[in-house]
Image (spheres, rainbow, N blue to C red):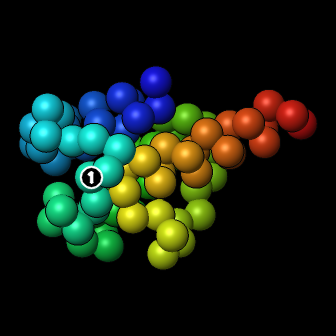
Amino acid sequence: MIKEKIIQILSEQYDVDAANLSAESTFEDMSFDSLDVAEIVMTLEDEFKISIEMSSDIKTIGDLEKHIQSKIDAESKK
C-alpha cells in the first residue's frame, strides 16, 4: 500500500510512468534532484501524517517505503 501510494504520487506530480517504477527505482534513475526529493518528502509527510528524516541511506522507492512503514509502526505504538 505504501509503495503504491509513493508510485502514484511520483507518477502524478512528476509525470513519471508508474509502470516503469518499482521498489528498486532510485531517485537518481528518475533524474530527481535534491529539491525534487524534498518536495516528494513533504508530500509524503502530509499523506501519511508523519515526519520523514531523509538520509543518504534512502536511495530507492523501497528504502523510502521501509522508512515510512517504520515511522507508522512507531507512531502506532505510542
- x, y percent for residue 66: 55, 46
Q: Residue furthest top?
A: 1
Which residue: 68% across, 45% down? 71
Q: Residue furthest front?
A: 24
Indicate left or right for 64 with 53 as reference. left
Q: Is residue 42 visible?
A: no
Which residue: 16% across, 47% down? 14
- Residue 22 or 34: which is nearer the viewer? 22
- x, y percent for residue 17: 10, 38
Callout 1, which amino acid?
Answer: Ser
Q: Residues within 10 Å of mark 1 (few under 14, many from 20)?
A: some
- Residue 73 or 37: which is nearer the viewer? 73
Q: Quadrant of the C terminus?
A: top right
**Residue carrying label 1:** 25
The quarter holding residue 12 reads top left
Indicate left or right for 13 with 59 as reference. left
Residue 59 against residue 41 in the figure, above or below:
below
Which residue: 32% across, 73% down? 34
Which residue: 27% across, 41% down? 22
